[in-house]
Amino acid sequence: MNDAENKKDIEQYNKQYALNKELAQMLKGGVIMDVTTPEQAKIAEEAGACAVMALERIPADIRAAGGVSRMSDPAMINGIQDAVSIPVMAKCRIGHFVEAQVLEAIEIDYIDESEVLSPADDIYHIDKTQFKVPFVCGAKNLGEALRRINEGASMIRTKGEPGTGDIVQAVSHMRMMNSAIAKITSMRTDELFNEAKELQVPYELICYVHDNGSLPVVNFAAGGVATPADAALMMQLGADGVFVGSGIFKSGNPSKRAEAIVKAVTNYNDAEMIANLSKNLGEAMVGINKDEITLLMAERGI
Amino acid sequence: MKVGVLAVQGAFIEHENILNKLGISTIELRKKSDLDMDFDRLILPGGESTVQGKLLGDLDMFNGLKERIMSGMPVLATCAGLILLAENIVNDSRSWFKTLPVSVVRNAYGRQLGSFHYDGIMEGIGIFPMEFIRAPYIESVADGVEILAHVDDKITAVKYKKQLGLSFHPELSDNYNIHKMFLEM
């Protein structure tokens, strides 16, 4: 490849990456819901989901079933794509770039390289710069977030602890990220080189955080959101939007709960409205404490 | 002058940032009581039209906003906002304000792989960097609707009375000329 071709390729990639970051911007202030069937996808869309995550089993069931958890059957994802008009996301295993190629081939709108599935690679994440479709990745601190962005992720979410209905991990990840960003923002510029070394991320990304006081991509909350108050808590802590996995379809009245969470994300500062939204929602998912589980999904892929 | 920005879901902060840089103050419209505040212009931002349309109804904001648009409040509607304004949506049985007499096609360029950047001519402005994200286009317009931009044979920007409807996202650009055009409308 000559230099001119190479330059054209880089230009093309940068344009696509900009478009992919921009799709995440359009999802802000919204709720992305896990669904396992076209029927659930329709319920989610009608309840006001801004996107759906198509997967065979929701995290709570993955946790219960154990074993190896993989990318969903493309036919099942196609069924969900046909059922709704909002963006459809799907998960591939960490490092499993062929699952990602398959998801790109069926024109998924966003790939979640997700710790919820069994990792396919102990060391390497997918080189996301090799894809046209966008990627969202989980992170529990700023270092992980910037490493994923450097690999080509165009959206970040907290890892939280999926399938537990326990918000504590998502809160802790969001707080860790925010405090690291605040710290970098207030650093002298001659301290940024060392910070890049400490966090094991490129200096340029540290400079971006220093200058802008934020990640260069949209940052959603995920992992353990079960109630409208949980969702509003994450928004008040600075999330751009919320993923709800098991919290909706593991609850007593999925449709009503989904609608309530959507409205709580829009009006996250309005306690009176959240109080009304929280009334008579039926049973929330039972949930398990992080101390009661043996498998911490958040430890996968650092 | 104060601009009300619909802030129920989507990329509303991007619009606010541009207006603030132009020295214009903004308010966010998230619930019915927000409509009691004074504002003289309205922005309907990008996002998911199904979500925004549903929340307009559920949060009881629909009628208050429609009345303002009908009585001539200037509106800038981008992408999802254009869908909310359109009288007819070709591939969806739903429709919302219906104040802009055009027919639009939702997700007209397909899924995210069909999203694209285009440097095209916007009437009254010249070349403008246009970002199309799972974008709609306008299939047909009624008499009296002014066509301001198109990509190939597809209409991507129109003006009708005080309504400016775009299928792309000027709020994602460093070029503020479309926002200036809206403020002068």
Image: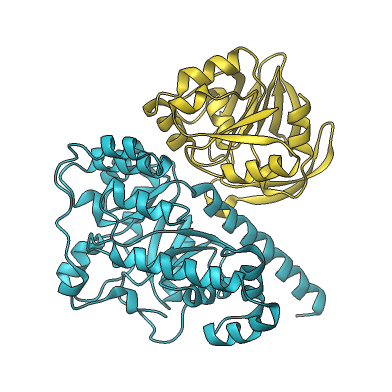
Q: Residue at x 72, y 49 (%)?
A: B173
Q: Is residue A179 above or below residue B77?
A: below
Of the 4 image quadrants, the one containing the C terminus of chain B is top right
Is residue B94 something that shows in the picture? no
> Which chain is displayed in yellow in the rendered image?
B
Left or right relative to B52: residue A34: left
Give the residue at x 45% y 24%.
Answer: B61
Q: Nearer the viewer, residue A242 or A9?
A: A242
Q: Could you tell me residue B64's position as x and y percent?
A: 49, 18
* Residue beneath the point at 19% across and 63% down: A61
Q: Quadrant of residue A94?
A: bottom left
Foreground: A198 or A245? Answer: A198
Tint applied to chain A in the drawing: cyan
Q: Is residue A80 visible?
A: yes
x and y percentages locating residue A143 in the rendered image: 50, 77
In this rendering, the answer to whether A54 lies above or below B185 is below
Q: Nearer the viewer, residue A143 or B125?
A: A143
x and y, in percent, of residue B166 in the image = 66, 34
* Rendered image coloring scheme: by chain
Figure quadrant of the N terminus of chain B = top right
Horizontal side of A214 relative to A207 (left or right) equals: left
Q: In the image, is residue B107 above or below residue A123?
A: above
